[in-house]
Image: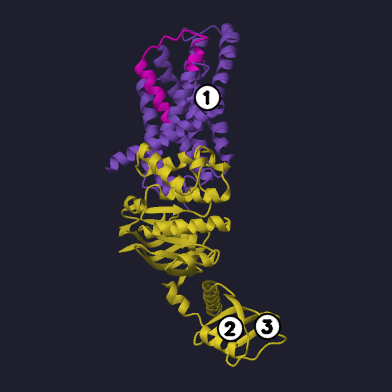
């Protein structure tokens, strides 16, 4: 079953700007799905429409089979939203924010308090439960929004750049938490500008640009289409000059660092054999660029070129 | 859980949130009207009132008590909803309700009830203050309570509409300053319209606040410039019209959805 189905979704704002130009999107139940795109591509507009915060111009949105126009309340029951901007009452105590949110979903106060306790403990916010939300740090506010979105136990969690501005330690712990709830059956849709985050967490992906979906596939399928990959090799001994390796594109960064570009027909094993034959010993290696990032840039560039050609 | 029990919980959540909001800041919400009204009682009731003499057969201070109580109800019911809903818009936490399966009428009823709660709280405090200056002998408890609550509902609805359209904090101050206060002061709070020339009596009849003040005065002391039935009918008509308009605004997402 699809957790989310979008058909021919259009959004034109009052100023004439067309943010969505007829997108189609399916997200399967249980998926961890990334919706990626550059700034202004239409990601947040699409999420706003799904969550009933933005009026669509036309098209259909269904959440677990419930049309958001015909059965809005049923559809909303399934959705938990973590928006990009902090959107809670900064003056309210942390625990009250969760209890109120639960109340809007028809959960009685007693039960809401227990759920709030569980969520806040899991996200390390329980000790701050009585403080006004404005007293929390940026990372804590992000976690508060996740706790709030989960208080009614939604089956579809939508996260719009949930880790923006949080430090790496908190980001990693949030990733672990999201993996955990996804493993428990919650479908997750994630937008992020940290592409290593999407690569690390998500199984399927859609790339949106200029209000259109330019790619939708599995992450592994998408990455397999990456034609070249650049690796950075750290060498044990200094190289006085750039070695000649047949079939490989090399660049010497410094005496002990080489960059090697591998095409999709070449293998890392083959590279190492060639290097060994030349007596070059590699201490460590890493991707020069995140693979998804490379793919993303390629696609957005290609889409930009197409639109420029179209205009010409 | 049925839809209705869910709606009841959502409604109660909004009301509790609203009551806690104005209770937490009681120094800004409850105390100022009590002090202002005390000053009205001292200046217009005791100091000047004794020189005015009687109005409609009552001591001047007894005559103005109903109007002053209702004025505080009007201003505070309005102020509560306009400031609370606009803050929710401004800080975007209105989204918490928009993403949840809360019908528009529950949102409206919750905010209006919050406004009524503040109106009742402030009205009660002002009534207690008035007991230091006058002996209130209530003519009709039923009419007094009915007009008290209906007026509070009407102005809470008006405050809601103002909040929906407001784009800045200035916008939520303009209507109370330039519309609400003149209508209230010219709505017979401090005088009987019988004192006015016929032309201004006719003009005053177009002021809806006049009907509320007089209906409330009838409930408290048993005199009114206006027929009670007409006054109640006008208040109810306004409530129906403003409710329908507010629901329409929510349905279209005016001011709250992109």
Helix, strand or loop status at disc 1: loop
Q: Residue at x 39, y 62 (%)?
A: A58
Tell me, by letter, which chain the rendering colours yellow. A
Specify whether A66 is left or right of B170. left
- According to the picture, the residue beneath numbered tag 3 turns out to be A252
Helix, strand or loop status at disc 2: strand
In three-dimensional space, the C-alpha distance between marks 3 and 2, rounded to whole angstroms, equals 12 Å
Q: Residue B5 in the image: x percent, y percent?
A: 29, 39
Helix, strand or loop status at disc 3: strand
User: Mark 2: few, some, or many residues within 10 Å (few <14, many ≥20)?
Assistant: some
- Examine the rendered structure and indicate whether residue A197 appears above or below residue A249: above
Residue toward you, B55 or A67: A67
Where, quadrant-wise, is the N terminus of chain B in this rendering?
top left
Picture quadrant where residue A248 is located: bottom right
* Any part of residue B227 in sight: no
Q: Residue at x 38, y 11 (%)?
A: B139
Residue toward you, A55 or B53: A55
- According to the picture, the residue beneath numbered tag 2 turns out to be A261
Task: Specify the principal SS of the magenta part.
Answer: helix
Based on the picture, tell me whether residue B146 belongs to the magenta stretch.
yes
Tell which residue pokes out farthest to the bottom in this image. Answer: A246
Specify whether B230 is left or right of B60. left
Q: Give me the chain letter of mark 2.
A: A
Q: Do marks 3 and 1 both belong to one polypeptide chain?
A: no
Mark 3 or mark 2: name the one nearer the start of the chain: 3
Bounds of the magenta span?
Answer: B126-155
Q: Are marks 3 and 2 in contact (CB under 8 Å)?
A: no
Q: Residue at x 39, y 67 (%)?
A: A25
């Amino acid at each position: 079953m699809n957790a989310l189905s979008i058909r021919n979704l259009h959004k034109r704002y009052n100023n004439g700007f067309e943010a969505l130009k007829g997108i189609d999107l399916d997200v399967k139940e249980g998926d961890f799905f990334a919706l990626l795109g550059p700034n202004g591509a239409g990601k947040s507009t699409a999420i706003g429409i799904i969550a009933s915060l933005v009026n669509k111009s036309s098209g259909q949105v269904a959440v677990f089979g419930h049309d958001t126009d015909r059965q809005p309340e049923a559809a909303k029951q399934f959705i938990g939203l973590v928006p990009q901007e902090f959107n809670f009452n900064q003056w309210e105590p942390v625990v009250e924010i969760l209890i109120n949110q639960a109340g809007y979903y028809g959960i009685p106060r007693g039960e809401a308090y227990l759920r709030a306790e569980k969520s806040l403990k899991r996200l390390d916010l329980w000790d701050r439960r009585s403080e006004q939300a404005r007293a929390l740090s940026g990372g804590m506010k992000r976690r508060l929004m996740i706790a709030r979105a989960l208080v009614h136990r939604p089956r579809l969690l939508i996260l719009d750049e949930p880790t923006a501005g949080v430090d790496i330690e908190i980001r990693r712990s949030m990733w672990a938490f999201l993996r955990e709830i996804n493993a428990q059956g919650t479908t997750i849709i994630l937008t992020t500008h940290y592409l290593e985050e999407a690569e690390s967490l998500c199984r399927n992906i859609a790339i949106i640009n200029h209000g259109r979906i330019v790619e939708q596939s599995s992450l592994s399928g998408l990455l397999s289409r990456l034609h070249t990959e650049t690796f950075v090799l750290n060498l044990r001994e200094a190289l006085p000059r750039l070695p000649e390796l047949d079939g490989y594109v090399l660049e010497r960064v410094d005496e002990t660092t080489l960059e090697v570009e591998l095409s999709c027909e070449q293998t890392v094993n083959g590279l190492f054999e060639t290097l060994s034959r030349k007596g070059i010993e590699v201490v460590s290696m890493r991707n020069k660029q995140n693979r998804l990032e490379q793919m993303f840039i390629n696609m957005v560039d290609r889409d930009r070129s197409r639109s420029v050609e179209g205009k010409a | 859980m049925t839809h209705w029990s869910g709606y009841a919980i959502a409604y109660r959540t909004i009301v509790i949130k609203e009551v806690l909001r104005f209770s937490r800041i009681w120094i800004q919400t409850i105390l100022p009207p009590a002090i202002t009204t005390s000053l009205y009682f001292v200046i217009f009731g005791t100091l000047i009132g004794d020189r005015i003499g009687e109005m409609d057969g009552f001591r001047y201070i007894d005559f103005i008590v109903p109007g002053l109580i209702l004025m505080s109800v009007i201003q505070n019911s309005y102020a509560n909803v306009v400031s609370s809903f606009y803050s929710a818009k401004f800080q975007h936490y209105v989204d918490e309700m928009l993403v949840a399966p809360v019908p528009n009428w529950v949102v409206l009823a919750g905010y209006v009830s919050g406004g009524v709660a503040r109106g009742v709280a402030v009205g009660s405090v002002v009534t207690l203050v008035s007991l230091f200056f006058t002996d209130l002998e209530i003519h009709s408890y039923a009419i007094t309570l009915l007009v008290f609550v209906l007026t509070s509902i009407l102005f809470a609805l008006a405050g809601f509409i103002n909040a929906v359209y407001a784009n800045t904090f200035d916008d939520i101050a303009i209507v109370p300053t330039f519309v609400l206060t003149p209508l209230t002061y010219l709505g017979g709070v401090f005088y009987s319209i019988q004192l006015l020339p016929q032309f201004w009596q006719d003009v005053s009849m177009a002021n809806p606040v006049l009907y509320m003040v007089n209906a409330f005065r009838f409930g408290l002391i048993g005199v009114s410039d206006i027929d009670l039935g007409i006054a109640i009918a006008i208040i109810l008509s306004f409530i129906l019209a403003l409710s329908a308009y507010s629901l329409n605004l929510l349905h279209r997402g005016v001011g709250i959805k992109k």
